[in-house]
Image: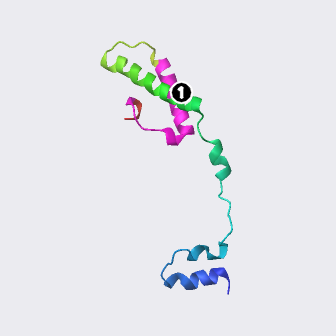
Amino acid sequence: MSTEQKDIQNLDKPYTQGSLFDEYEGEVLPVEGADRAESTKATDEEMLRIAQLRRLLDYHAYRYYALDKPEISDYEFDRLLVELQELEDKYPELNTKSGIWNK
């Protein structure tokens, strides 16, 4: 009887822990994409830049919206925002969804 036939036959039986992996006992199976996971971690410099961009954007948004005294142009603000969004897209685990631009 093939493994597929056994699986179909066992559909009516209650699940017992480990039953799905009994035939792989003792084997280490590769996880697809595991080699890429390490290479997508943000460097210290990138994490520092993300924090810096968030502070800058908060500061300049406050000056623009609350004080009506901007220090940088809209273009410069947008450039900073795009840089932050690109870094957060590259490293979604660092995206905190905080700040005026994410509300």
Residue placed most toward the observer, 49 or 61 = 49
Where in the figure is residue 35, as x and y percent of width and height? 68, 50
Q: Is residue 45 above or below residue 97?
A: above
From which residue to which does the magenta span run?
Answer: 75-100
The residue sitting at 33% across, 14% down in the picture is 68
Q: Residues within 10 Å of mark 1 (few under 14, many from 20)?
A: some
Residue placed most toward the observer, 18 or 69 = 18
Question: For residue 86: magenta?
Answer: yes
The residue sitting at 65% across, 72% down in the picture is 25
Residue closest to the far front: 26
Question: For residue 20: magenta?
Answer: no
Q: Secondary structure at mark 1?
A: helix
The residue sitting at 67% across, 87% down in the picture is 1
Q: Is residue 56 above or below residue 9?
A: above
Where in the figure is residue 49, as x and y percent of width and height? 53, 27
Residue type at mark 1: give it: Arg
Residue receiving disc 1:
49
The figure's colour scheme reads: rainbow
The residue sitting at 52% across, 74% down in the picture is 17
Quadrant holding the C terminus? top left
Where in the figure is residue 88, as x and y percent of width and height? 52, 36
